[in-house]
């Protein structure tokens, strides 16, 4: 039956497809190097084609390494190459796809996550064994918080101008003054952005990580924000006296990582005031594997899941929902937690995320 459902393919055709696949892995690492060293940004600013020597001199880098990196970029059809002049040029229409300003849509950002994933490949492989570890701890990803913070720094530039208008009346309520919780806030970029724009509202950001809360608190002090505090809390065990405390609660790319997502959602429901609202932003996709076959980003998202999201959840003995737990299961779990009027909304600036807007009766 399986053979009948498979498109006919020769061994040579499959081999070529796998050569392209494995080559793409090295291209991803090359893009990560280009983003990390600033080479992509430098090529983006060039007025015209340049030789490897000229690029190396500007970047203060070794020409031989740079030339080999450029060879990857050229054969991957990312950088254009003039054989006669031996010059290189990054066309402007490709720049936005590679630079971090694209946030969740930036292949420069995702390629850096491929680099981080390569560092834990052996650890993840060990988890497959019946007698192997349950998962991989957050500590195995030393660059993760910085990577995520960088994405949010760019993504949340449009938080006030594009995300808030999708929630009727919230902008006006924030102007008047309400109480807001950003749970699992990471470095608190969303919290800081909202607190700066709406001084009459009060904001609390929480996260399990001492490291990111310290970073967020220091950043808040630098910005002189008096209406925001950051606290270390586990989302499945929030302060008892926060019952019915918040007019609006936000979680952004948090729930699918949780060891106990059902309890986390029940805790959020407990903390929202009656009549209050909850925004859960998570990865856009479906719960059934077959329904994700047409999504060109599906291998990327399942890869992020295997090499981080599912694995860190299982490390804590958790459910291991995975990145593509899907909007069907997400809506079901929100309903079971008690939320009503659940709407699944697109996020204009983020093609791989979806926004569930809910009410607490």
Image (cartoon, rainbow, N blue to C red):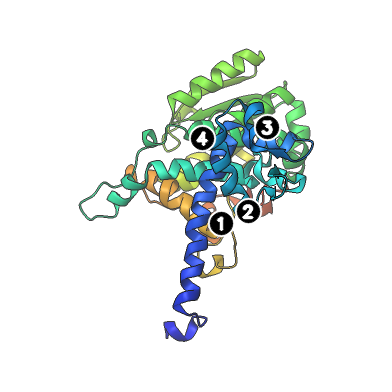
Q: In the image, which disc is placed on residue 342?
A: 2
Residue 136 seen by the camera:
yes
In three-dimensional space, the C-alpha distance between marks 3 and 1, rounded to whole angstroms, equals: 54 Å
Label 3–label 2 contact, CB within 8 A: no
In three-dimensional space, the C-alpha distance between marks 1 and 2, rounded to whole angstroms, equals: 7 Å
In this rendering, the label closer to the viewer, 4 or 3: 3
Query: Which sits earlier in the primary sequence, circle 4 or circle 1?
Result: 4
Q: Quadrant of the N terminus?
A: bottom left
> At numbered mark 4, what does the secondary structure look like: helix, strand or loop?
loop
Q: Going 48% across and 27% down the picture, which residue do you hit?
A: 241
Q: Going 50% across and 69% down the picture, which residue do you hit?
A: 16
Label 1–label 2 contact, CB within 8 A: yes
Residue 264 position, x and y percent, is 46, 42
> At numbered mark 1, what does the secondary structure look like: helix, strand or loop?
helix
Question: Is 7 above or below relative to 49?
Answer: below
Q: In the image, which disc is placed on residue 54?
A: 3
Question: Viewed as shown, does residue 202 lie left or right of 255?
Answer: right
Q: What residue would you read off at disc 4?
A: 184
In three-dimensional space, the C-alpha distance between marks 2 and 4, rounded to whole angstroms, equals: 21 Å
Label 2–label 4 contact, CB within 8 A: no
């Amino acid at each position: 039956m399986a053979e009948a459902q498979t498109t006919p393919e020769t061994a040579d055709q499959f081999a070529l497809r796998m050569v392209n696949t494995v080559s793409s892995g090295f291209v991803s690492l090359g893009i990560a190097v280009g983003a990390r060293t600033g080479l992509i940004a430098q090529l983006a600013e060039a007025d015209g084609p340049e030789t490897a020597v000229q690029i190396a001199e500007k970047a203060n880098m070794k020409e031989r390494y740079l030339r080999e990196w450029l060879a990857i970029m050229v054969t991957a059809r990312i950088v254009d190459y003039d054989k006669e002049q031996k010059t290189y040029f990054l066309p402007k229409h490709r720049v936005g796809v590679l630079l971090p300003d694209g946030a969740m849509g930036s292949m420069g950002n995702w390629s850096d996550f491929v680099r981080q994933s390569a560092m834990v490949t052996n650890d993840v492989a060990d988890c497959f064994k019946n007698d192997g570890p349950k998962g991989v701890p957050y500590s195995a990803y030393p660059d993760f918080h910085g990577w995520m913070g960088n994405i949010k720094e760019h993504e949340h530039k449009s938080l006030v101008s594009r995300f808030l208008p999708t929630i009727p009346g919230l902008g006006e309520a924030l102007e008047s003054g309400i109480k807001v919780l950003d749970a699992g806030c990471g470095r608190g970029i969303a919290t800081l952005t909202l607190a700066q724009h709406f001084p009459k509202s009060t904001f609390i950001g929480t996260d399990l990580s001492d490291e990111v809360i310290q970073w967020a608190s220091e950043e808040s002090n630098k910005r002189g924000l008096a209406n925001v505090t950051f606290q270390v809390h586990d989302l499945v065990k929030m302060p008892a006296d926060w019952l019915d405390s918040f007019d609006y609660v936000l979680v952004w790319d948090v729930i699918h990582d949780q060891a106990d997502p059902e309890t986390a959602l029940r805790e959020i429901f407990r903390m929202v005031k009656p009549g209050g609202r909850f925004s859960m932003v998570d990865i856009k996709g479906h719960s059934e594997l077959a329904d994700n076959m047409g999504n060109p980003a599906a291998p990327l998202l399942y890869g992020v899941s295997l090499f981080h999201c599912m694995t860190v959840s299982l490390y804590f003995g958790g459910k291991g929902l995975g990145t593509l737990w899907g909007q069907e299961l997400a809506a079901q779990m929100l309903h079971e937690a008690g939320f009503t009027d659940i709407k699944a909304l697109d996020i204009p600036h983020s093609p791989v995320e979806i926004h569930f807007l809910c009410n607490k009766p």
